[in-house]
Amino acid sequence: MKKMKQIISHVVNTRLGFILTLLAFYWLKTMWAYHVDFSLGLENPYQLLLSIINPIPLGLLLLGLSLYIKRTR
C-alpha cells in the first residue's frame, strides 16, 4: 500500500502526470453529468461509445495548450 501511494504521488507530482490526472477527472465529471443531469437515454452501443469518446478531444486540446506554458523559475 505504501509503495502504491509513492507511485501515485510520483506520477501526480510530475507536470504531465498532473495534467493527465486533471484530464481523467474532467472526463469522469463529464460522464457523470451526461448520465445524471442530462438523462440522454442512450439506446444502443454506438451512442454510448460516442458519449465516452466525446470529452477526450477538448481535454487533449487543453492538455496541449497547458504543455506550451513555460515553467517559472
Image (spheres, helix red, strand yellow):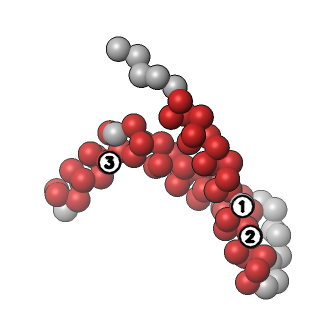
Marks 2 and 1 close (CB-CB < 8 Å): yes
Q: Residues within 10 Å of mark 1 (few under 14, many from 20)?
A: some
Is label 3 in a helix, a strand or a loop? helix
Q: Nearer the viewer, residue 6 or 33?
A: 6
Image position, residue 36 (x, y; %): 73, 64
Give the structural element (helix, strand or loop) at label 2.
helix
Quadrant for the N terminus in the image: bottom left
In the rendered image, is residue 30 in sight?
A: no
Tell me the amino acid under the disc marked 1.
Answer: Asn
Tell me the kind of residue under disc 3: Val
Q: Nearer the viewer, residue 67 or 11?
A: 67
In the rendered view, tell whether residue 31 sits above or below residue 48.
above
Q: How far is disc 3 from disc 2 in space, using C-alphas?
A: 29 Å
Q: Quadrant of residue 55?
A: bottom right
**Where is residue 59 drawn, in percent x and y?**
62, 48
* Residue 33 place in picture, x, y as percent: 71, 58
* Vertical arrangement, residue 4 with respect to residue 13, above or below: below
From the viewer's perspective, tell me whether residue 24 is left or right of residue 6. right
**Which residue is disc 2 drawn over?**
50
From the viewer's perspective, is 40 left or right of 57?
Answer: right
Residue at the image position 48 percent from the left and 42 percent from the top: 19
Q: Which residue is mark 1?
A: 54
Q: Mark 3 = which residue?
A: 11
Q: CA distance from mark 2 to mark 1?
A: 6 Å
Answer left or right for 25 relative to 49. left
Quarter in which the C terminus is drawn: top left
- Residue 3 visible, this angle: yes
**Residue at (54, 33) in percent of width and height:** 66
Q: Amino acid at mark 2?
A: Leu
